[in-house]
Amino acid sequence: MVQYKSVVHSKLPKVGDTIFSKMSNLAASENALNLSQGFPDFDCSPQLIELVGQAMRNGHNQYAPMAGLLSLREMIADKTFELYQREYNPETEITITAGATQAIFTAIAATVSENDEVILFTPAYDCYEPAIELVGGKPVYVQLKEPDYTINWEEVKKVINQRTKMIIINSPHNPTGTTLSKEDLAELDKLTAQSDMLVLSDEVYEHIIFDGEGHHSAASFPKLAERSFIISSFGKTYHTTGWKVGYCLAPENLTKEFRKTHQYNVFCVNTPIQHAYAEFLKDKSEYSQLGTFYQEKRDFFINLLKDSRFKLQKTKGTYFQLLNYEAISDEADVDFAIRLTKAHKVAAIPVSVFYNSNIDHKVLRFCFAKQNQTLEEAAEILCKL
């Protein structure tokens, strides 16, 4: 009897496990300090944990509304208006999502069609490109300018055409830790004003900005906000990355399309955790002081590295610090990252993987959302290289 095997033609033939999975798995197998994947090695607020338990004990254990708890959306609306002076209707313009990655995928899937072009700035976080390709879109790449990883808006203008459907921005930026200025957002506002282009603004690190600078959100620009999906994350803000809850802000017409896809993607999000966040958001200090908290960790980490052979520029936001190792090795960054993990027991992320082409500036990304003891142990090893 002839047996037939189903043949699957992959829609993402170039994609395997993410670099984050690879390096975290390698760190675990080598018993190395994991400064690769972006998550804290310390716990979240005990009060927040208690609020989740309280919600469970109060019987909030069934499906939440598809768009999310209204009480949570109302708190997000209030917070957004206070920070960025933009009013979002919590009933029709805010959607709770199963993390920021799901929100990003849903925004792309809901609006990008076959052969539409989407502009990405490289090095780019790795979830954008696969989502675009899955829906038949075409990523168009604009490289950020070193050493400050800034946008050359004249280069952006050159790649825009009638097929350009969306521009994706990310500030504070993963993996580089740079931020977009008010002038950058004004350029984007002007660039998109006379078009049908959409903007996807990934702002998950909005509260982690340093040195007295503020976050410039797409929500602060009225015309830009009218064409933007703005994505944020409770995981980054409250040290709860494993809970996977985020949200999407968008005008009603865009939210309507977003929710059409959202309801068949995850339908709704963890109910007791939404109740907990809705209550926890009442304490503004928990997010307003986050930048100070992580700036202390950034400064602690880089001060420990002042006598090392690594070259660095202080990160402006996020909890990532780039380190250039040119003075230590001429290895490719992937090879150096693997050797650093295996031989020296410190795991980091090679930045070349965030480019669409073979670009390697001998730079690794280190996560400093760690206990000071973890950072001390890692820095002691790095200073010996």
Image (cartoon, helix red, strand yellow):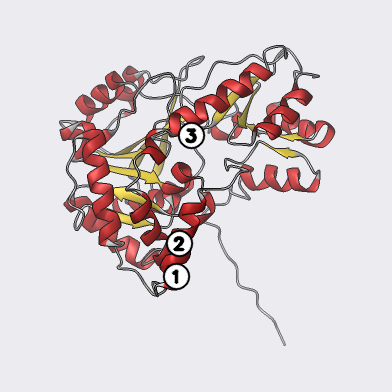
Label located before the other in sequence (1 or 3): 1
Q: Secondary structure at mark 1?
A: helix
* Quadrant of the rendered image containing residue 223: top left
Q: Secondary structure at mark 2?
A: helix
Q: What x and y, as percent, mark residue 233? A: 41, 46
Label located before the other in sequence (2 or 3): 2
Residue with the mark numbered 3: 124
Q: Is residue 95 visible?
A: yes
Residue 61, above or below 367: below
Around disc 2, counting alpha carbons within 10 Å, would you say few (fewer than 14), some (14 to 19), or many (20 or more)? many
Are the residues at dot 2 and dot 1 in contact (C-beta closer than 8 Å)?
Answer: yes
Image quadrant occupied by the C terminus: top right
**What amino acid is labelled 1 in the image?**
Met
**What amino acid is labelled 3 in the image?**
Ala
Q: Secondary structure at mark 3?
A: loop
Say which of marks 2 and 3 sits in front: 2
The disc placed on residue 52 is: 2
The disc placed on residue 46 is: none
Residue 198, above or below 350: below
Say which of marks 1 and 3 sits in front: 1
Could you tell me which residue is drawn at 22 percent across and 32 percent down?
220
* Quadrant of the rendered image containing residue 56: bottom left
Are the residues at dot 2 and dot 3 in contact (C-beta closer than 8 Å)?
Answer: no
**What amino acid is labelled 2 in the image?**
Val
The disc placed on residue 56 is: 1
Q: CA distance from mark 2 to mark 3?
A: 34 Å
